[in-house]
Amino acid sequence: MADDNLSAFRAHLPDLSQPRFTTMKKQDAHEYAKAFIEDGNPPWLHGLWQHWRRLYQEPFKGITNDGRVRNDLFHLRDDGILISSIVAAANNLLSLLTPDQLSKTIFHIDAPEWRTWSNPEFLLSNKGIRLDEVSDSIRSAALNLLKETLSPEGYEKALGAMRINGFLGELVGAPQICGEFSYNVCFFGTPSEQQAWGFQWYGHHLCLNIFLYRSTIVVSPFFTGAEPNGIDDGPYKGTRILHEEERLGLELMRSLEGSVRDKVQVFKELKDPGMEHGRWNHDDQRHLCGAYRDNRVVPYEGVVVSSFSLEQQALVKAILNQFLLYLPQRARELRIEECERWFHETYFCWIGGYRDGDAFYYRIQSPVVIVEFDHHSGVFLTNKEPKRFHIHTLLRTPNGGDYGMALRKECEGIRQEWVWEGDKE
């Protein structure tokens, strides 16, 4: 029985007799991606992918607010992670793989393939193992690695994203393309308690890049999304994600005084006629720091957080806590403390309305973190305007912090092959 509180999306279910869905039903993930690459449909997404390929050729620099990388912002610290448990889980997974699987799954710690994650359902970068194509034992071992690495609540959030993706696949009759386990996993470096390494978990609406060195963990960049963002029927009924990020952002926006709120609201409409060319695109819509945007210049917008009241600053920290939920508790606390030290250069901006039912975008940005929240129009569902049941969120660590890059010069044993612009400045 459907839960009405989660069922607003059902007014926008697609007609599954359309060629798009009848074709998808017959394809697996590889056939689907091949048809996309060869036929170029949909053209807007194919064009974006071509642009991504050009961006990938650029040396890694990191996202900045003005084009200049600020060095020495990030240093190794004791995040309190249980690296031995994570390494044991990783080695258990790798021990189950065939030589052929291993050859496709382990990359050099500085391999540029770190940067080839993407969040659409199209399998554009087929690295590592795909969880819906392996044995139950391999899939269970991969899930255990994720469980050992993330916080308990972060692991549940990741599972929620995967389960909602499977629910979407059922809604549109394409479980081979949008499934609970339509995710790829690959490694960078060899799992070790003493040397740097990491792994990547990516697919539709869930992309996690995890860098590990002894007791230090970096989970950045990541993307988490959902269409719809809740399950109203079936075995996972009641699953919902990203609603806290939505609630807290709206509470913060509504708490601001009128003149401050007017400065925070940089555009009143989600696709505002005042937006400069390139500010909105069909796939990313309003968010700026998604797949392949590793070097983007994102100027500050809105109002500096240090000018907010203590209660409003507490809401900013609560939002950051939700975005940093994947991190184990101590690592998350230290990261929030780091963010708070930069509140004098942390900006909050907003696009869209803030009344009941309004869809919106917001961003919190500083030299050490960027988080974005965006309500989207339908991709599989038919809503032409953004609705609250389709959400994209992401986190970046600017100034070279993504993929743990800014920390690597402090890690013993790294023969750094992935040169980045921060090394030159």
Image (cartoon, grey):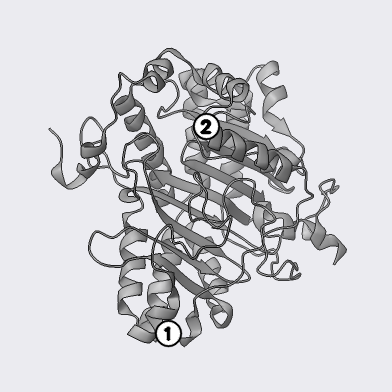
**Residue 399 x %, y %:** 69, 64
Q: Which amino acid type corresponds to the residue marked 2 in the rendered image? A: Ala
Measured as percent of width and height from the top left, residue 161 is found at: 40, 41
| Label 2: few (<14), some (14–19) or many (≥20) C-alpha neighbours in 10 Å | many
Q: Residue at x 31, y 55 (%)?
A: 243
Q: In this view, does 337 lie to the left or right of 74?
A: left
Regarding mark 2 in the picture, which secondary structure is present there? helix
- Residue to which mark 1 is pinned: 308
What residue sits 48% from the left and 34% below the top?
143
Compared to residue 198, the image places residue 170 above or below, namely above
Residue highlighted by disc 2? 142
**Which quadrant of the rendered structure holds the C terminus?**
bottom right
Q: Which residue is drawn at 79% across and 50% down?
A: 59
Q: What element carries label 1?
A: loop
Residue lying furthest front: 273
- Rendering coords of residue 140 (x, y %): 46, 28
Q: How many angstroms separate mark 2 from mark 1 (CA)?
A: 43 Å
Pick whichever, 339 or 172, lies toward us: 172
